[in-house]
Amino acid sequence: MTSRDPLPRRRAVWYLVAAAAGVTAGALARLLFAVLPAPWDTLANTSALWGLVPFLVTAGFRVHGRAAAGVGAVGLLTMVSVWVLLAPQPAPPRILLLWGAVGVAAGALCGWAGALASSPLAGQRIVAAAIIGGLVLGEGLYGIVLIGGPQWWCEALAGAGFAVAWGVTLPERMRALGAAALVAAALFAAFLGYDAIPAG
């Protein structure tokens, strides 16, 4: 690698963009949470929808390889940090640790999915659609079954929409939707466990 190699500079830009997107999204989420009427304010505070930030950053900038996970983690962790800093009440250290760990892991996963979304290979695009679509769909189903409210139906429909959006052909879109449904079903128990940790 020579000093003229543009890759390190490009990676630095990716991380800066991810951090800026996280700051913007965190502030916007906090604003929407404050101004939206119930129950729609819930959509500003859903972990699955937050995963769209690292996904869209890595997909939009075509970040690939290990950098996609790092860029995704930075984007979501920055968003979580801004959300916490703008909170009217400080969160307990245990919750901060949990949110930080989940932010890094989920951000890396969604960032990796965003990298796959721009792949020329149909199989990789289906994996990307299954991850991001299944994540949003799974949380929507969780809300429909255990909480109730129209906002969860909207989130579930958005998850299905994200699943089919990355397909090129109709069969590919149907496969992506089916894969997202399987991921959503698997994540249903994970969301239950995630919510049980702060309450325990």
Image: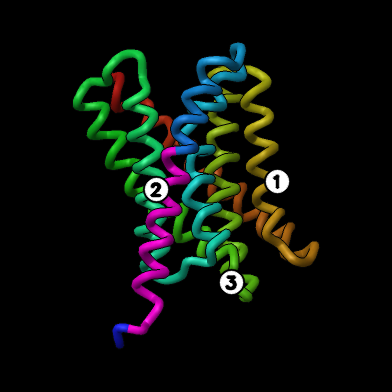
Residue drawn at 21 percent across, 27 percent down: 94
Read off the residue under disc 1: 161
> Label 2: few (<14), some or many (≥20) within 10 Å?
many
Q: Residues within 10 Å of mark 3 (few under 14, many from 20)?
A: some
Label 1 sits on what residue type? Gly
Front-lying residue, 189 or 2? 2
Secondary structure found at label 3: loop
Spatial separation of the CA atoms under disc 1 and disc 3: 19 Å
* Magenta stretch, residue numbers: 4-23
Residue positioned 45% across, 56% down in the render: 111
Residue at the limit of the structure toward the front, as seen here: 4
Pinpoint residue 153: horizontal percent, then vertical percent.
67, 28
Of circles 1 and 3, the one toward us is 3
- How many numbered badges does the structure rendering display? 3
Q: Which element is circle 2 on?
A: helix
- Mostly what secondary structure, the magenta segment? helix
Q: Which residue is mark 2?
A: 19
Residue 22 painted magenta = yes
Name which residue type carries label 2.
Ala
- Label placed on residue 119: 3
Q: Quadrant of residue 78?
A: top left
Quadrant showing the N terminus: bottom left
